[in-house]
Amino acid sequence: MLGYHGRVRKRRSDTAGLVDPENARPPEDGEREGPAREVRIVIDHVDGTRRGQRQELSAEARIRFGRHPECEVAFDAHRDIDASSRHAELRRVNASWVLVDLGSSNGTFVEGHRTTEAPVAAGAPLMVEFGPGGPRARIFIGDDSAIAALPPPPRPRRQPLWPKVALAAGAFVAAALLMMLLLRATC
């Protein structure tokens, strides 16, 4: 096909998928030649009844979190009661991701702050708590190499020791009082 100045001009379909060698550049760090890598979503359960478990999910349009059995990330319906049955969703919006609270009773906490919507960046782990004291999970979006480089999830929170000590001390005092009452009654 002849162009405006009499030069041969290629049709768009003739050049589709070809790289112009004059403007070509080598791939930079983090880039890759060839087909795009498959992105997956990793959920590391840090607290709750699923503590220590890892789920690797395909990057679908949405990932649901909650106690309902149809949720992709389902918490225990009887023990993880701080999480709602349909608590939150991880949604794909164009080329990015957003975590959306679905009007849960106890709220969604991202990195310790209550939120109704939070962006989730690929390659950056995000700590999410489903209700105060509820199940906690680390969410990560990435390809195989990014997932392999992901450090282990944080250790679960330690429960404070003072309630157990107070309960034990109360039981000891109650037992001592009962013994004193029984000794008085027999004498």
Image: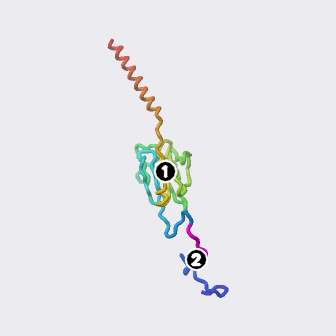
Q: Is residue 186 above or below residue 133?
A: above
Q: Residue at 52% of width from left, 53% of height from top?
A: 125
In the image, the segment drawn in magenta is: 19-27
Q: Residue at 46% of width from left, 34% of height from top?
A: 161
The quadrant of the rendering that contains the N terminus is: bottom right
- Examine the residues drawn in magenta and state their main secondary structure: loop
Q: Viewer-proximal residue, 138 or 148?
A: 148
Badge count? 2
Return the residue at label 2.
Answer: 21
Colouring scheme applied when the structure was drawn: rainbow
- Inspect this view and state whether residue 9 appears: yes
Q: Is residue 3 left or right of residue 176?
A: right
Q: Amino acid at mark 2?
A: Pro
Residue 114, image x and y in percent?
55, 46
Return the residue at label 1.
Answer: 138
Q: Viewer-proximal residue, 86 or 8?
A: 8
Residue 5, image x and y in percent?
67, 86
Q: Is residue 53 above or below residue 40?
A: above
Q: Residue at 52% of width from left, 47% of height from top?
A: 108
Residue 104, image x and y in percent?
50, 47
Q: Viewer-proximal residue, 122 or 89?
A: 122
**Mark 2 Cα within 10 Å, few/some/many (few <14, many 20+)?**
few
